[in-house]
Amino acid sequence: MMRRLFGTIGAVLGLATAAWAQPDGWTPPRTGDGRVDLQGVWANNAATPLERPDSLAGKATFTDEEVAELQETAQRLFGGADDAAFADGVFNAVLANVERNVSRDGGTGNYSSVWMVDRVFENRTSLITDPPDGKLPAYTPEATARLEAEAAYRRDHPADSAADRSLQVRCITYGIPRVGGLGAGYNSYFQIFQTPDHFVMLGEMIHDARVIPIGDMPHAPESIRQWHGDSRAHWEGDTLVVETKNYSPQSRYRGSAENLHMIERFTLAGPDDLHYELTLTDDTTWVSPWTAMVPLARSQDALFEYACHEGNIGMAGILGGARAEEAAAAGR
């Protein structure tokens, strides 16, 4: 389900670190147990790229005038029935001020931008706040060798079976966290439910639901591994902090898997603004931890069914095409 938000793409201003304070005179709503009420539907439609583009090196923020210019360019490029752009492609196309961002594969065509949600521009030039250069840390030598081996296997075995395809294509999960790539602007809505002892984050994409205990409950033993890891939450003032570890070795997030350790912080920054900050650590993948902040906006929309398995006719075509290519190669 994709949504089109009519009107001009909004600019969210003042999201630099120094301006993350709550609005003057506003007090956050609270649940019956006195905790900040984080419940509702939240949209991740920020156009801000995960990493700062090389062309913006040393520039952490845009001026308000620059944001307005980006907004105007985005409306011109994607405000009609032209080709759509996905993920960081929107930001990159607007930054380059190009007329099109065509991502066609052969002759199958592309989504029209009419069916895509408008992306939101802000002052920041990257979601990553640490390292200060807005870039992901370098991969460790171990990770580089691992990723090269995995890439070589995918080239030689693109579809021996369904297990060779990504977890997303197999309709298993888009992973936790869902930041970067198609994390924004494409079925990128979440619904939060909250009780005194549990926090639930339901994602629209494949309906991933995280049911997270709040309190002093210990983590599951390290021998128990899960697609989304094992999460436990606690409150630090008005911020809900979630620690996640025990990921499955088959999980994948930017080269990290079973050694990923994640800290998430959910802070209500205003009546319609939720700051979602995460810090990821894996010393077998990156040379240092890194932190990003994703601005989530309250939405009055409902989450819609994402019938992934029921509609996954593409998998049959992928596997059938691979068998046809093998038969043709054998014939030659």
Image (cartoon, rainbow, N blue to C red):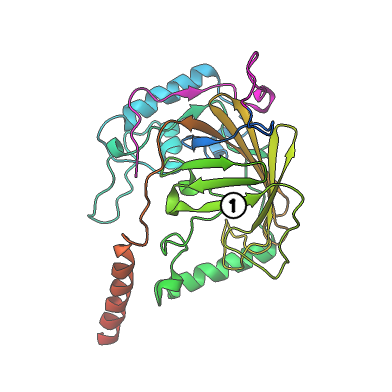
Q: Which residue is mark 1?
A: 211
Quadrant of the rendered image containing residue 25: top right
Q: 258 above or below 84?
A: below
**Residue that lies at the very extreme toward the left in this rendered image:** 107
Q: Is residue 280 magenta?
A: no
Name the residue located 65 percent from the left edge and 25 percent from the top edge: 20
The stretch of residues the image draws in magenta is 1-29
Q: Which class describes the residues within 10 Å of circle 1: few (<14), some (14-19), or many (20+)? A: some
Would residue 180 be seen by someone viewing this image from the given angle?
Answer: no
Residue 135, how many percent across, how many down?
A: 62, 43
- Measured from the top left, where is residue 99 in percent x and y? 32, 33
Above-or-below relation of 173 to 271: below
- Say what amino acid the circle numbered 1 marks: Val
Magenta-highlighted stretch: main secondary structure?
A: loop
Q: Position of residue 52 (x, y in %)?
A: 57, 38
Examine the structure image and report whether residue 3 is included in the region drawn in magenta: yes
Instruction: Report the residue that reaches farthest toward the top.
Output: 25
Give the side of residue 53 with respect to residue 240, left or right.
Answer: left
Q: Where's residue 316, x and y in %?
A: 30, 70
Query: Is 240 positioned to the left or the right of 159 in the image?
Result: right
Q: Is residue 16 visible?
A: yes
Instruction: Say which element carries label 1.
Output: strand
Seen from this angle, which residue lies furthest front? 32
Q: Quadrant of the N terminus?
A: top left
User: At 33% across and 61% down in the image, what residue appears?
Assistant: 310
Work out which quarter of the rendered image holds the C terminus and state it: bottom left
Residue sticking out furthest to the bottom: 331
How many numbered badges does the structure rendering display?
A: 1
Q: Nearer the viewer, residue 152 or 88?
A: 88
For the point 30% across and 37% down, which residue is it?
Answer: 113
